[in-house]
Amino acid sequence: MLDKPDTAAPAEMLTRRFLEALFAGDMGQVLDMVAPDAVFIPARREASAANPLFGTYSGPEGAALFFGRFGDLFTPERFDIAAGVGDARRACLFGRLRHIVRATGKTFASDWALVTEWQGGKLVLYHFYEDTAALAEAMSA
């Protein structure tokens, strides 16, 4: 069940539950799964004036800020998981995404990968990879 993740579940299953809650809009569940010292890295660690998503975010507050900015920037259209691998603590999922950039109306399509790490059923690392050149193009006027 999404409301009480099994701390013994493999990291891949926890990551899938996290993404399921995220795309269902259940931010309460999403934030409940985030450790106080979790690190979120969306494609680039360094902040950028050109992209409000870039930077490193910490804990549930940082996750809420990051996912809020994501919602401000994009209208999600597709987020497909092709496959994933993992063990008790770490997982890597990958697939294909397609979003519309709200400010430009342009489509951003990319392959993606997500690396996560879990401790005690809580997310401690979320590192997302995507085609940042395609994203920059979709964000350009």
Image: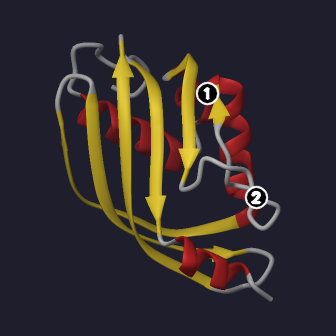
Instruction: Give the quarter of the figure containing the C terminus.
Output: bottom right
Q: What element does badge 2 sit on?
A: loop
Tell me, for residue 94, which label it has, or none.
none
Q: Amino acid at mark 1?
A: Gly
Q: Along the line of sight, which residue is nearer the eye, 119 or 45?
A: 45
Q: Which mark is residue 48?
A: 2
- Residue 34 image point, x, y percent: 53, 23
Mark 2 to mark 1 CA distance (whole Å)? 28 Å
The answer to whether residue 10 is left or right of residue 73 is: left
Query: Of 23 and 113, which appears nearest the observer?
Result: 113
Q: Secondary structure at mark 1?
A: helix
From what the image shows, is residue 129 above or below residue 25? below
Q: Residue at x 46, y 65 (%)?
A: 130
Can residue 123 be seen?
yes
Q: Position of residue 67 (x, y in %)?
A: 65, 46
Pointer 1 residue: 28
Q: Is residue 24 visible?
A: no
- Mark earlier in primary sequence (2, 1): 1
Closer to the camera in the image, 59 or 4:
59
Q: Residue at coordinates 77% horizontally, 84% vertically from top-left?
A: 104
Q: Quadrant of residue 26?
A: top right
Residue 89 is situated, as x and y percent measured from the top left of the image, at 26, 24
Residue 105 in which image quadrant: bottom right
Q: Nearer the viewer, mark 2 or mark 1?
A: 2
Q: Give the amino acid type for the residue marked by disc 2 in the picture.
A: Ser
Residue 136 placed where, x, y %?
65, 77
Mark 1 neighbour density, 10 Å: few (under 14) some (14–19) many (20 or more): few
